[in-house]
Amino acid sequence: MWVPPTAPTSARRRSARCGTAGCGTQPRRAPNTPGRRRSHGCVRPPTSPRHASGRPVGDLGRAQGPGPVTRPGGPDTRVAAVQGAISGISTIWVVIAVGWFIAHRGLVNQPGRRLMSTLAFTVGSPALLFSLLLEADLAHVFSRTVVVTIAAVAVVGVLYLAVAIPAFKQSLGDGLIGFMSSFYTNAANFGLPVAVALLQDGTWVAPVMLLQLAFIMPICLAILDVAASRRTGRRTNPWKYLLLPVRNPITIGILAGLAMNLLGVGVPDFVMRPVEMIGGIALPLMLLSFGVSMRLDPLPGKGPHRAPLWVAVALKVVVHPLAAWAIGSAMGLQGTDLYAVTILGALPTAQNVYITASRYGEGEMLARDAVFWTTILSVASLLVIAALLG
């Protein structure tokens, strides 16, 4: 049975009993300790117990009793790597297959697919991202591993822009979707099980998600908004361009969650519970919409987007993990830290890229096929990395 670590004497003195009826006795939230902020100053206990280091244990990074710890690279770790990859892939592809099936049976057509994408983009995703960023541990964002992650993303993105846009004469919107497909990582529904299996710690993906959701995605959405304004012929002055990102629902959800996390603003349960319920529709709708597109749209790899597609796939599956490993080695990362940044670089393209492309009507087939092929091919990359660095 897990026993919480004894708090230092000074921390016990600072603990205070809440006077709110029915709240029980919960200490106030210590800095950088995950848990939902509540308006009356108390905090709901974390959903899983935590080590003294602050990292969670339980379903996402379980530490069960005082048993032996498997050293990364052992046979048990490699078996867990295979099992984690299979689990992550099967979960994703079962939902995608359901989307393909309902489209094949005629239950959903193209207008229905667009409706699912719109709901995922404008309703589900903002709620999901708000709740994720509200409870994220922001202290981990400033570690050296995150610097390596940012540098690897920059290298891969610049390589795509240098190769694909001059060679394939892509529009601003299509080029940006290809740019995102080359580095934007599926850290949530694929990265979490992989991180737990290979690294024994699901919190490794948190800073990657925060980097993508709080910084990369708002900038990309602003550029796509500008491209959409140009395409439709709407004349927009520079001041309105600056306001476009904050009018985007996903950006609003990201910035609101990040700001409330930084400021420590309390959110009562009667607000958070419906927000979390609405956010729960985001991932299923994303995957179902993806499956519908697999049935109703041209087959993966076909069409004029083939050349930029394979450039993006090669960069994501091969170059991204190599760049993370090389930069991490140059910065002095070793052992688990170096292994982790390399694994994170090898994760496939995120479903969010396809949903974003579908919402803006830019590079839809390129994004869809990049998600499809990187999700399949990344398994080989992950297993090679586990064999070499694990």
Image (tube, rainbow, N blue to C red):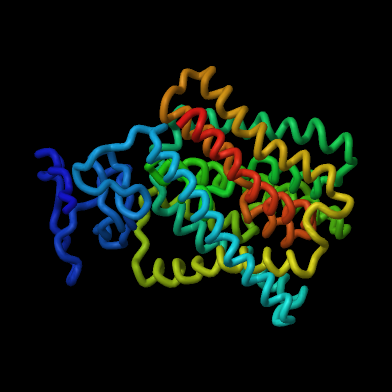
Q: x%, y% of residue 199?
A: 41, 39
Tell me the residue at 74%/81% (across/down). 106
Q: x%, y% of residue 374?
A: 66, 47
Tell me the residue at 52%/37% (across/down). 343
Reply above or below: 359 against 33.
below
Q: Find residue 164 and report its image quarter.
A: top right
Q: Find residue 359 and report its image quarter.
A: bottom right
Q: x%, y% of residue 203?
A: 40, 44
Tell which of 4 and 381 is nearer to you: 381
Q: As drawn, is 169 to the left or to the right of 100? A: right
Q: As drawn, is 188 to the left or to the right of 139? A: right
Tell me the residue at 78%/42% (across/down). 310
Count of numbered marks: 0
Tell which of 254 and 353 is nearer to you: 353
Tell which of 40 and 84 is nearer to you: 84
Q: As drawn, is 185 to the left or to the right of 64? A: right
Tell me the residue at 29%/42% (across/down). 54
Q: x%, y% of residue 220?
A: 68, 47
